[in-house]
Amino acid sequence: MKLAALFSGGKDSTLAIYKAMKKHEISCLITIKSLNPDSYMFHTPAIDLTKLQAKSVNIPLITVETKGIKEVELNDLKTAIKKAISDYNIEGIITGAVESVYQATRIQKICNELDLWCFNPIWQKDQIELLKELVQNNLKVIFTGIAAYPLDETWLGKEINNEIIEKLIEYQKKYKINPAGEGGETESLVTYAPFFKKKILIKNYEIDYENHAGRMNITEAVLKWF
């Protein structure tokens, strides 16, 4: 089928695309740029880098801006999906939803209204297994946001690897954090995936951190051959 993928540039949407493209055609990517950093629906850290990622994978990108007002922002998502239907004749939408019923049900409702298939390749996937799958499939993922004790500023910019996964398992048991960040504990950026033609090279960034909450604000990034 011809599908559009909701794409934030983070680990979940990228892994969902990677799994979906084994059987389906990815006709375009859809990025919603929210002006509200606390959007209920949309990932915001490093969202502008989806342009570089889309260029790397050579898939057209539709970007729509939203003020990020709860529920109202869904109209902007619907507008973007309608454009994907008009421009690329898509038959369905791929999401990277894992546990958020709030997000999944609202995207499903829009798909129902537009007569589209809603495909959620990693829905309800065990979150430790999800992290391990990233490493096993050579997806390079860094943390661009944190918001939970005992995570501190040293986590910003770290790449997810087996050592990091073991640490997150430890924190899950000891502090009850969600290891894949489904509770907002972490945000991520994919700098490379197997379907990327070039990798993302981060040249400059700033750290904004206070009291176990922070962001890695990337100010300069380029595409680089391997």
Image (cartoon, rainbow, N blue to C red):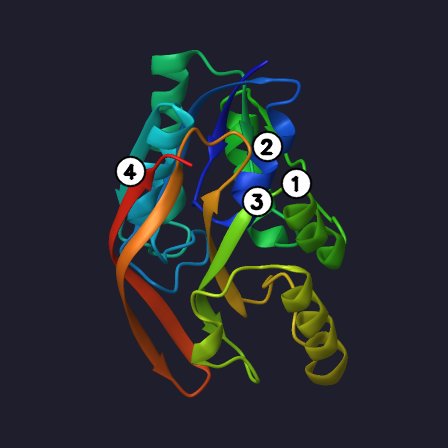
Q: Name the residue under label 3.
A: 139
Spatial distance from mark 2 to mark 3, Cα to Cα? 10 Å
- Along the horizontal axis of the image, is 62 left or right of 140? left
Viewer-nearest of labels 4 and 1? 1
User: Reading the chain from its start, which is encountered first: label 4 or label 1?
Assistant: 4
Q: Mark 1 points at which residue?
A: 137
Q: Are marks 1 and 3 in contact (CB under 8 Å)?
A: yes
Helix, strand or loop under label 3: loop
x and y, in percent, of residue 171 in the image: 69, 78
Question: Which quadrant of the figure has residue 21?
Answer: top right
Task: Identify which residue is drawn at 72% across, 75% down.
Answer: 172
Spatial distance from mark 2 to mark 1, Cα to Cα? 9 Å
Classify 2 as above or below 75.
above
User: Reading the chain from its start, which is encountered first: label 4 or label 2?
Assistant: 2
Q: Are marks 2 and 3 in contact (CB under 8 Å)?
A: yes
User: Reading the chain from its start, which is encountered first: label 3 or label 4?
Assistant: 4
Q: Mark 2 points at which residue?
A: 18
**Circle 4 Cα neighbour tier, 10 Å, few/some/many (<14 / 14–19 / ≥20):** some
The amino acid at mark 2 is Tyr
x and y, in percent, of residue 100 in the image: 61, 54
Helix, strand or loop under label 4: strand
Task: Identify which residue is drawn at 67% across, 71% down.
Answer: 168
